Image (cartoon, helix red, strand yellow):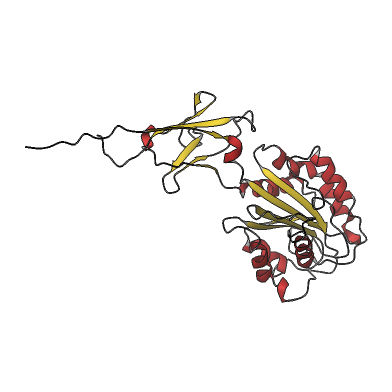
Amino acid sequence: FLEYQKLPDPRDSKKSFPVLEIIQDNRVDVLWIVDDSGSMKPIQNNIIRNAETFMQEFTKIKYLNWKLGLISTDPTDDTFLGFEEPFDAQTTAPVEIFKMAVGSLGASGGNEKVFSNIDKHLSDFDGSNPDRAAFVRRKSHLAIIMVTDEKEQSRGAKYDPMAFINNLKGRLSPNKNLRFYGALSLDGVGNCRSGDSSQYPGSPYETVVNETGGFTIPACENFGTRLADIGKDIVSLLDSIKLLLMDRPVIETLKVFYRGEELPPGSREDGGYWYYDSFSNTINFYSLKFIEDLERDVLEVDFEIDDGWDRD
Protein backbone atom coordinates (compact mmCIF):
# COMPACT_ATOMS: atom_id res chain seq x y z
CA PHE A 1 0.00 0.00 0.00
CA LEU A 2 1.05 3.60 -0.40
CA GLU A 3 2.02 5.61 2.65
CA TYR A 4 1.34 9.33 2.49
CA GLN A 5 3.24 11.93 4.45
CA LYS A 6 1.30 14.86 5.82
CA LEU A 7 2.79 18.12 4.54
CA PRO A 8 3.68 20.78 7.08
CA ASP A 9 1.37 23.75 7.18
CA PRO A 10 2.46 26.67 5.03
CA ARG A 11 4.16 29.52 6.87
CA ASP A 12 3.35 33.15 6.28
CA SER A 13 5.64 36.14 6.50
CA LYS A 14 4.08 39.44 7.57
CA LYS A 15 6.54 42.22 8.19
CA SER A 16 6.63 46.01 8.32
CA PHE A 17 9.52 47.96 6.82
CA PRO A 18 10.14 51.61 7.79
CA VAL A 19 10.53 53.65 4.62
CA LEU A 20 13.68 55.32 5.92
CA GLU A 21 15.41 51.93 6.18
CA ILE A 22 14.58 51.15 2.55
CA ILE A 23 16.00 54.37 1.14
CA GLN A 24 19.05 54.85 3.36
CA ASP A 25 21.53 54.02 0.56
CA ASN A 26 20.00 56.31 -2.07
CA ARG A 27 22.90 58.72 -1.89
CA VAL A 28 24.53 60.93 -4.49
CA ASP A 29 27.40 63.38 -3.96
CA VAL A 30 27.63 66.21 -6.50
CA LEU A 31 30.79 68.26 -6.96
CA TRP A 32 30.82 71.44 -9.05
CA ILE A 33 34.23 72.71 -10.15
CA VAL A 34 33.90 76.13 -11.77
CA ASP A 35 36.63 78.12 -13.51
CA ASP A 36 37.15 81.50 -11.78
CA SER A 37 39.46 83.12 -14.33
CA GLY A 38 38.76 86.56 -15.80
CA SER A 39 36.69 85.40 -18.78
CA MET A 40 34.27 83.32 -16.74
CA LYS A 41 31.96 85.91 -15.18
CA PRO A 42 29.25 85.58 -17.90
CA ILE A 43 29.24 81.79 -17.51
CA GLN A 44 29.09 82.03 -13.71
CA ASN A 45 26.13 84.40 -14.08
CA ASN A 46 24.52 81.83 -16.38
CA ILE A 47 24.78 79.22 -13.62
CA ILE A 48 23.22 81.63 -11.13
CA ARG A 49 20.32 82.44 -13.49
CA ASN A 50 19.59 78.76 -14.02
CA ALA A 51 20.41 77.39 -10.58
CA GLU A 52 16.79 76.69 -9.76
CA THR A 53 16.26 74.50 -12.84
CA PHE A 54 19.19 72.37 -11.69
CA MET A 55 18.49 72.29 -7.95
CA GLN A 56 14.80 71.44 -8.32
CA GLU A 57 15.74 68.02 -9.70
CA PHE A 58 17.14 67.21 -6.25
CA THR A 59 14.80 69.08 -3.95
CA LYS A 60 11.61 67.70 -5.49
CA ILE A 61 12.53 64.08 -4.72
CA LYS A 62 12.07 63.69 -1.00
CA TYR A 63 13.81 60.31 -0.69
CA LEU A 64 17.00 61.44 -2.48
CA ASN A 65 19.92 61.69 -0.06
CA TRP A 66 22.10 64.25 -1.85
CA LYS A 67 24.95 66.52 -0.89
CA LEU A 68 26.72 69.10 -3.01
CA GLY A 69 30.04 70.91 -3.00
CA LEU A 70 31.53 73.80 -4.96
CA ILE A 71 35.21 74.46 -5.67
CA SER A 72 37.10 76.53 -8.23
CA THR A 73 39.79 75.49 -10.71
CA ASP A 74 42.44 77.57 -8.91
CA PRO A 75 44.48 75.50 -6.39
CA THR A 76 45.11 78.59 -4.24
CA ASP A 77 41.38 78.92 -3.49
CA ASP A 78 39.65 77.32 -0.55
CA THR A 79 36.34 75.49 -0.89
CA PHE A 80 33.20 77.57 -1.52
CA LEU A 81 30.34 75.33 -0.46
CA GLY A 82 29.59 71.95 1.10
CA PHE A 83 32.92 71.02 2.68
CA GLU A 84 33.38 72.78 6.01
CA GLU A 85 29.64 72.49 6.59
CA PRO A 86 27.29 70.12 4.73
CA PHE A 87 25.12 71.45 1.94
CA ASP A 88 22.54 68.71 1.49
CA ALA A 89 18.92 67.62 1.55
CA GLN A 90 18.51 69.07 5.06
CA THR A 91 19.62 72.57 4.01
CA THR A 92 17.00 75.31 4.14
CA ALA A 93 16.70 77.50 0.97
CA PRO A 94 19.31 75.51 -1.01
CA VAL A 95 18.77 77.40 -4.29
CA GLU A 96 19.60 80.79 -2.77
CA ILE A 97 22.62 79.41 -0.91
CA PHE A 98 23.93 77.80 -4.10
CA LYS A 99 23.50 81.07 -6.04
CA MET A 100 25.39 83.04 -3.40
CA ALA A 101 28.22 80.50 -3.38
CA VAL A 102 28.63 80.69 -7.17
CA GLY A 103 28.51 84.49 -6.95
CA SER A 104 31.35 84.42 -4.41
CA LEU A 105 33.74 82.66 -6.83
CA GLY A 106 34.87 85.87 -8.47
CA ALA A 107 36.91 86.01 -11.67
CA SER A 108 40.46 86.61 -10.52
CA GLY A 109 41.79 83.06 -10.64
CA GLY A 110 44.72 82.27 -12.87
CA ASN A 111 44.78 78.48 -13.15
CA GLU A 112 42.50 75.92 -14.82
CA LYS A 113 43.77 72.84 -13.02
CA VAL A 114 40.51 70.91 -13.00
CA PHE A 115 41.69 67.36 -12.29
CA SER A 116 44.37 68.20 -9.72
CA ASN A 117 42.11 70.60 -7.83
CA ILE A 118 39.36 67.98 -7.61
CA ASP A 119 41.93 65.57 -6.22
CA LYS A 120 43.35 68.19 -3.84
CA HIS A 121 40.04 69.07 -2.22
CA LEU A 122 38.71 65.52 -2.05
CA SER A 123 41.99 64.40 -0.48
CA ASP A 124 41.92 67.26 2.05
CA PHE A 125 38.51 65.98 3.12
CA ASP A 126 39.20 62.25 2.96
CA GLY A 127 38.36 61.42 6.56
CA SER A 128 41.99 61.10 7.71
CA ASN A 129 41.62 64.28 9.76
CA PRO A 130 38.97 63.73 12.47
CA ASP A 131 38.07 67.44 12.31
CA ARG A 132 37.29 67.28 8.59
CA ALA A 133 34.60 64.89 7.44
CA ALA A 134 35.05 63.21 4.07
CA PHE A 135 33.15 64.92 1.27
CA VAL A 136 32.68 61.74 -0.77
CA ARG A 137 30.63 59.08 1.00
CA ARG A 138 31.87 55.64 0.01
CA LYS A 139 28.35 54.22 -0.34
CA SER A 140 27.31 57.05 -2.63
CA HIS A 141 27.31 57.80 -6.33
CA LEU A 142 29.63 60.64 -7.33
CA ALA A 143 28.78 63.19 -10.04
CA ILE A 144 31.28 65.89 -11.05
CA ILE A 145 30.31 68.92 -13.16
CA MET A 146 33.23 70.75 -14.81
CA VAL A 147 32.62 74.35 -15.94
CA THR A 148 35.41 76.11 -17.83
CA ASP A 149 36.46 77.83 -21.06
CA GLU A 150 40.09 76.69 -20.99
CA LYS A 151 42.01 73.46 -21.52
CA GLU A 152 42.87 71.18 -18.61
CA GLN A 153 46.24 72.21 -17.10
CA SER A 154 46.95 69.59 -14.41
CA ARG A 155 50.38 67.99 -14.69
CA GLY A 156 51.63 64.53 -13.83
CA ALA A 157 50.82 60.92 -14.67
CA LYS A 158 48.32 60.88 -11.81
CA TYR A 159 46.09 63.14 -13.89
CA ASP A 160 46.11 61.07 -17.02
CA PRO A 161 42.34 60.76 -17.64
CA MET A 162 42.10 57.01 -17.04
CA ALA A 163 44.39 57.08 -14.00
CA PHE A 164 42.34 59.96 -12.62
CA ILE A 165 39.07 58.07 -13.15
CA ASN A 166 40.42 54.95 -11.45
CA ASN A 167 41.67 57.00 -8.49
CA LEU A 168 38.22 58.49 -7.95
CA LYS A 169 36.45 55.15 -8.38
CA GLY A 170 38.68 53.79 -5.63
CA ARG A 171 36.92 56.14 -3.21
CA LEU A 172 33.54 54.54 -3.95
CA SER A 173 31.95 51.18 -3.22
CA PRO A 174 32.18 48.84 -6.24
CA ASN A 175 28.44 49.09 -6.96
CA LYS A 176 28.43 52.90 -7.03
CA ASN A 177 28.85 55.06 -10.12
CA LEU A 178 31.19 57.90 -11.05
CA ARG A 179 29.98 60.28 -13.73
CA PHE A 180 31.53 63.42 -15.26
CA TYR A 181 29.62 66.21 -16.98
CA GLY A 182 30.95 69.27 -18.75
CA ALA A 183 29.50 72.74 -19.16
CA LEU A 184 32.27 73.92 -21.45
CA SER A 185 33.02 76.85 -23.71
CA LEU A 186 35.54 75.12 -25.96
CA ASP A 187 35.89 74.64 -29.69
CA GLY A 188 33.79 71.65 -30.70
CA VAL A 189 31.08 72.12 -28.05
CA GLY A 190 27.99 73.57 -29.74
CA ASN A 191 28.85 76.95 -31.23
CA CYS A 192 31.33 77.85 -28.50
CA ARG A 193 34.80 79.20 -29.14
CA SER A 194 37.61 79.03 -26.64
CA GLY A 195 39.75 82.12 -26.07
CA ASP A 196 42.91 80.10 -26.75
CA SER A 197 41.37 77.77 -29.38
CA SER A 198 41.25 74.87 -26.93
CA GLN A 199 39.58 71.86 -28.51
CA TYR A 200 37.11 69.59 -26.77
CA PRO A 201 37.50 66.63 -29.19
CA GLY A 202 40.44 64.54 -28.02
CA SER A 203 40.79 66.46 -24.75
CA PRO A 204 41.07 65.00 -21.24
CA TYR A 205 37.58 66.42 -20.59
CA GLU A 206 36.12 64.37 -23.42
CA THR A 207 37.81 61.22 -22.15
CA VAL A 208 36.48 61.41 -18.58
CA VAL A 209 32.99 62.37 -19.77
CA ASN A 210 32.77 59.53 -22.29
CA GLU A 211 34.37 56.91 -20.06
CA THR A 212 31.91 57.57 -17.24
CA GLY A 213 28.74 57.88 -19.36
CA GLY A 214 28.19 61.61 -18.90
CA PHE A 215 27.66 64.34 -21.46
CA THR A 216 28.71 67.91 -22.24
CA ILE A 217 26.65 71.05 -22.79
CA PRO A 218 27.80 74.38 -24.32
CA ALA A 219 28.53 76.92 -21.59
CA CYS A 220 28.58 79.80 -24.08
CA GLU A 221 24.78 79.61 -24.41
CA ASN A 222 21.94 80.07 -21.92
CA PHE A 223 22.03 76.47 -20.73
CA GLY A 224 19.03 76.46 -18.41
CA THR A 225 17.18 73.47 -19.83
CA ARG A 226 20.39 71.55 -20.40
CA LEU A 227 21.42 72.16 -16.80
CA ALA A 228 18.13 70.55 -15.81
CA ASP A 229 19.09 67.60 -18.04
CA ILE A 230 22.28 67.16 -16.01
CA GLY A 231 20.22 67.24 -12.82
CA LYS A 232 17.85 64.58 -14.15
CA ASP A 233 20.72 62.39 -15.29
CA ILE A 234 22.41 62.60 -11.88
CA VAL A 235 19.17 61.52 -10.21
CA SER A 236 18.99 58.58 -12.64
CA LEU A 237 22.28 57.25 -11.20
CA LEU A 238 20.33 55.93 -8.25
CA ASP A 239 19.35 52.30 -8.31
CA SER A 240 15.68 51.45 -8.08
CA ILE A 241 14.45 51.45 -4.50
CA LYS A 242 14.85 47.89 -3.27
CA LEU A 243 13.39 46.01 -0.33
CA LEU A 244 15.37 42.84 0.47
CA LEU A 245 13.28 39.89 1.67
CA MET A 246 14.80 37.48 4.18
CA ASP A 247 12.65 34.53 3.02
CA ARG A 248 11.75 33.37 -0.47
CA PRO A 249 8.09 34.03 -1.27
CA VAL A 250 5.59 31.96 -3.18
CA ILE A 251 5.43 34.65 -5.82
CA GLU A 252 1.69 34.59 -6.47
CA THR A 253 1.03 35.23 -2.76
CA LEU A 254 3.28 38.29 -2.51
CA LYS A 255 1.45 41.48 -1.52
CA VAL A 256 2.61 44.98 -0.54
CA PHE A 257 0.50 47.39 1.51
CA TYR A 258 0.76 51.09 2.31
CA ARG A 259 -1.53 52.58 4.94
CA GLY A 260 -3.82 49.57 4.64
CA GLU A 261 -4.16 49.75 0.86
CA GLU A 262 -2.62 47.12 -1.41
CA LEU A 263 -0.14 48.50 -3.94
CA PRO A 264 -0.56 46.83 -7.35
CA PRO A 265 2.46 45.06 -8.85
CA GLY A 266 3.36 45.13 -12.54
CA SER A 267 4.93 47.48 -15.04
CA ARG A 268 4.96 51.22 -14.45
CA GLU A 269 3.06 51.69 -17.72
CA ASP A 270 0.22 49.48 -16.43
CA GLY A 271 -0.03 51.36 -13.14
CA GLY A 272 2.18 49.05 -11.12
CA TYR A 273 4.09 50.35 -8.12
CA TRP A 274 6.59 47.52 -7.80
CA TYR A 275 7.95 44.27 -9.23
CA TYR A 276 9.66 41.25 -7.68
CA ASP A 277 13.22 40.28 -8.70
CA SER A 278 13.72 36.58 -7.97
CA PHE A 279 17.50 36.75 -8.58
CA SER A 280 18.12 39.29 -5.80
CA ASN A 281 14.98 38.34 -3.81
CA THR A 282 13.96 41.98 -3.68
CA ILE A 283 10.81 44.02 -4.14
CA ASN A 284 11.78 46.90 -6.45
CA PHE A 285 9.80 50.14 -6.38
CA TYR A 286 9.75 52.46 -9.38
CA SER A 287 9.33 55.48 -7.11
CA LEU A 288 8.33 56.38 -3.57
CA LYS A 289 6.54 59.59 -4.53
CA PHE A 290 3.34 58.15 -3.04
CA ILE A 291 4.85 58.17 0.47
CA GLU A 292 3.29 60.94 2.56
CA ASP A 293 5.43 60.81 5.69
CA LEU A 294 8.98 59.76 4.89
CA GLU A 295 10.14 59.56 8.50
CA ARG A 296 7.24 57.63 10.04
CA ASP A 297 5.50 55.63 7.31
CA VAL A 298 6.02 51.91 6.81
CA LEU A 299 5.44 49.43 4.00
CA GLU A 300 3.90 46.09 4.91
CA VAL A 301 4.78 42.92 3.03
CA ASP A 302 2.73 39.73 3.26
CA PHE A 303 3.49 36.41 1.56
CA GLU A 304 3.56 32.65 1.96
CA ILE A 305 7.11 31.40 2.47
CA ASP A 306 8.39 29.08 -0.24
CA ASP A 307 9.54 26.03 1.78
CA GLY A 308 10.09 23.79 -1.23
CA TRP A 309 6.90 21.76 -0.90
CA ASP A 310 4.59 21.62 -3.91
CA ARG A 311 1.20 21.70 -2.25
CA ASP A 312 -0.65 21.71 -5.57
Direction left: furthest residue = 1
Query: Which quadrant would residue 298 be assigned to in this image?
Result: top right
Query: Which quadrant would residue 9 be assigned to in this image?
Result: top left
Direction bottom: furthest residue = 157
Whole-percent x, y for residue 248 in the image: 39, 42
Query: Which quadrant would residue 208 be assigned to in this image?
Result: bottom right
Residue 92 vs residue 269, the one in the foreground: 92
Q: Is residue 32 visible?
A: yes
Q: Is residue 187 visible?
A: no
Whole-percent x, y for residue 222 in the image: 80, 49
Vertical comparison of 21 with 175: above or below: above
Vertical comparison of 299 with 153: above or below: above
Whole-percent x, y for residue 73 in the image: 83, 62
Residue at 77 percent of width and 46 percent of height: 224
Q: In screen coordinates, is 181 left or right of 25?
A: right
Residue at 64 percent of width and 62 percent of height: 169
Q: In screen coordinates, is 216 left or right of 51?
A: left
Q: Quadrant of the C terminus?
A: top left
Residue 169 vs residue 113, the one in the foreground: 169
Direction top: furthest residue = 260
Whole-percent x, y for residue 1 in the image: 6, 37
Residue at 90 percent of width and 51 percent of height: 104
Residue at 67 percent of width and 38 percent of height: 61
Residue 36 vs residue 81, the one in the foreground: 81
Q: In screen coordinates, is 61 left or right of 94?
A: left
